[in-house]
Image (tube, rainbow, N blue to C red):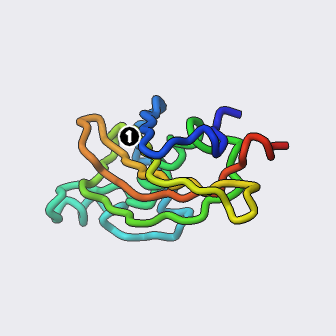
Amino acid sequence: MTGRYYEEFTVGQTIEHEKRRTVSESDNQRFCDMTMNQQPLHLDAEFAADTQFGERLVNGLYTMSLAVGLTIPDTTDGTIVANLSYDDVSHPRPVFHGDTIRARSTVTDKRETSDGERGVVTMRVEAFNQDDDLVCEFERTVLSLKRENAE
């Protein structure tokens, strides 16, 4: 377990996640298949060639999911009770096949639950491509274990 307990988060703390992942055509295809998202902008090279992007885009929900996954080892691996919400999601730039994604989390808020047994932590997650362009950002709120209540 490498995640952080509630007490280990500090408002204003920024965590640069070391893990990165290069997105393949297969990743995008499988994600679209699993979620039944058949948007031609993600799957049809001929269609996408005639758009302003000139090529297929990686599904934005995949990009967001990947960003969450990249943050887990440093934030909530084994210390989470539940994800409570994902808010204020934006995709300022597209992701293309072959882009390498990295993530950064900044703790924006934390508070104990009313029973004092756990804590709620909110983080701003930002995902960047290999050129350091911001490609996705969102707020993630989690219900976190407290160290003294961990089993």
Instruction: Where is residue 6? Give x, y as percent.
Output: 64, 45
Q: Residue at x 33, y 68 (%)?
A: 40
> Looking at the image, which residue sits at the far right?
151
Residue nearest the viewer, comparing 87 with 26: 87
Residue nearest the viewer, comparing 7 with 52: 7
Q: Residues within 10 Å of mark 1 (few under 14, many from 20)?
A: many
Instruction: Where is residue 144? Give x, y as percent.
Output: 66, 51
**Residue 38 in sight:** yes
Q: Residue at x 78, y 42 (%)?
A: 148
Q: Residue at x 48, y 32 (%)?
A: 19
Instruction: Where is residue 3? Give x, y as percent.
Output: 64, 38
Say what secondary structure mark 1 lies in.
Answer: strand
Query: On the image, which quarter does residue 90 sit in?
Result: bottom left
Residue type at numbered disc 1 = Ile
Query: On the image, which quarter does residue 23 sit in?
Result: top left
**Residue 28 in sight:** no
The image quadrant where one finds the C terminus is top right
Q: How many marks?
A: 1
Q: Is residue 50 above or below residue 123?
A: below
Q: Name the side, left or right, on which 3 lies relative to 99.
A: right
Q: Residue at x 54, y 53 (%)?
A: 110
Residue nearest the viewer, comparing 34 with 62: 62
The image quadrant where one finds the N terminus is top right
**Residue under circle 1?**
101
Q: Name the side, left or right, on which 35 lies relative to 25.
A: right
Instruction: Where is residue 99? Give x, y as percent.
Output: 32, 40
Residue nearest the viewer, comparing 83 with 97: 83
